[in-house]
Image: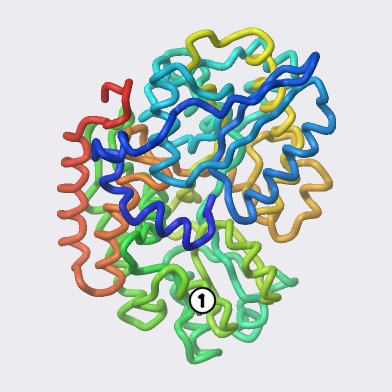
Amino acid sequence: MQPPLLSRRRALAGGAGALAAAGALGSLSGCAAPATAAGPGQTLLRYWHLFGGGDGVNMQGMLDDFRAGHPDIALEASTLQWGAPYYTKLGMAGAGGRAPELAALHLARLAGFAPGRLLDPFDLGLLAELGVREKDFPTDIWRRGRVGGKQYAVPFDTHPFVLYYQTEVCEKAGLMSGGRLKPISGADDFAGALRAAKKATGQPGLVTETLGPDCITPWRLFSSFYAQTGGTVLSPDGKRVALDDAKALRVLEYLARLVEEGLMVRRVDYAGSIGVFNGGKTAFHLNGEWEITTFKTTGLPFSMTRVPALFGTAATQADCHAFVLPHQKDRGGATNEAAHTLVAWMLKNSVAWARGGHVPAYLPVLDDPAYLALKPQSEYRTVIDDVALDEPAWFAGSASRLWIELGAVFSGVLTGSRSPRNALTEAKARLRTLLDTRNPLPGATS
C-alpha cells in the first residue's frame, strides 16, 4: 500500500530511528482501542488499520457493506497514521493486552511482532467454518503467516512492484502487439526496449524514484532484480547477511549502465517520477501498483504488467497486507468470532479492494469474472505466485528500516554518487548493524 504522498513522507522521514527512540514510545497517548458501546444484541468489534488515500476510500466502502450485512456486529474501525507510528502503537497495545480485536499488518513485518506475545493465533477451525482454508491461498504467502505451527497472519493481498507503460509511446516505438506490450525477456531485451522508446521520443525510456530523504524505490528495484537471480539478502531465519556479491553486483552494475546510457532518468524524487510519467513522453515507470488511481485520474493512456524477468526467474519484490489478532488478555467468545467473520467476509469480497491495484490473496477471487473485468488490474494477477518478500526480520517489511537504509544506499548507484561495489559494501555493513540492534517494540525479544 502507498499512502498519500505527503503522509508517506512524514511517516517515513524519521522512520529509521522512530522505533528505537524511547521518546517515540512515550509520546503516544494511549494504546487501547477507543471504547464504544454496542447496541442491544450486538457484539463490539474493533478494527485498526493504516489505509489512507484511495485505499482508505475502498476500505471504508467495504466496511460499510459489511455493517449493512451484519447488523449483529457493531464494527468500530479506526484509521491510524501510516508507517512507524502505526506499528509502534499496535505493538504497545498488544504488549498491554488492551488491543483491538483485529488489525491490519504488512506480512513481512510479522517477525518483528513477536507472535505469541504481541499477537494471538487465528482459529483455523473457525475460519474453515466460514469458508476460508489454507488451500485458498498461495502456499508461500500463507506459510509466511505461520509461526511455531500456528497461523498468526491471514493474507489479504499482495502489492507488488510493477511495470507501468504508456501505450501510445510504446506503440510509436514498435513495442506493442495486439494492444499489449510485447513480451520482454532478459536484461538485454529490456535495455533494447528502452533504447527504442528513447529513439521514438528523445526522452529516457524509464523513470522511477531515485532520490529523496526517505527514498525506498531503489531498494524495491534492487530487491526485485536480485530476487530474480535466486539470491537472498538474509538467511532464511533472518539472522545472517546472505548477500551474494556476484549476483548483487550483476544487478547494480546493470542499473548503473541504464542511467549512464541515458535510458533512465538519473535524479528524480517520488513526486517527480509521477510527474515525469504523467508528462506523456516516458515509456515506462517502475513503482508499486497503488499509483493506478493517479494515472487513471489524469487520463493518461497507460497499462500495467509484471516486472519483466531480466535475470532468470520471474520474481518481483512485494509485501502483503494481512489481518492479525493483536494480543488480548481475554481473547475469545463472541468478539473473537466477529473478528474471524470480518476477515472471511473481506477475503471473499476483495474484488472491491482490487480496484486500488492490489492483487487479492484469496485465490477464488482471481477467477471471479468481476475481477477479470478490472483492467489493467487483472493483467498482472499471476504475480501472486512469484512475490519476493523480505526474509523474516524485525527491521524488514513496508516502511521498515531495511527499506529506508538500503534505499538510501542504492539511490547512490542510480544518481552516480556511489559505485556498485561501494554500495554493496555499505549495504552489508548496514545490514550487520541492523542485525546487531535489538527489536525496540515492547514485548519483543529479537
Residue closest to the eye, 351 or 338: 338
Query: Is residue 143 visible to the viewer in this orientation of the structure?
Result: no
Q: Which residue is found at the position 24% from the left and 74% from the top?
A: 416
Scheme of image coloration: rainbow
The picture places residue 279, in percent across and down from the top left corner, at 56, 83
The percent coordinates of residue 313 (x first, y second) are 46, 49
Amino acid carrying label 1: it is Ala
Classify 329 as above or below 61: above
Give the residue at x 72% y 21%: 38
Q: Is residue 428 visible?
A: yes
Q: Residue at x 50, y 21 (%)?
A: 152
Where's residue 308, x and y in %?
Answer: 51, 60
Q: Secondary structure at mark 1?
A: helix
In the visual, does 369 lie left or right of 256?
right
Question: Is the residue 97 above or below the residue 396 in the image?
Answer: above
Residue at screen point 28% across, 53% down: 406
- Viewer-side residue, 227 vs 28: 28
Left or right for 434, reference 136: left
Q: Nearer the viewer, residue 29 or 444?
A: 29
Q: Quadrant of the C terminus?
A: top left
Where, by quadrant of the figure, is residue 156 drawn? Answer: top right
Q: Mark 1 Cα within 10 Å, few/some/many (few <14, many 20+)?
A: many
Circle count: 1
Left or right for 327, reference 66: left
Q: Where is residue 263 shown, x and y percent of the image?
A: 41, 80
State the residue position of label 1: 193
Q: Is residue 60 above or below residue 148?
A: below
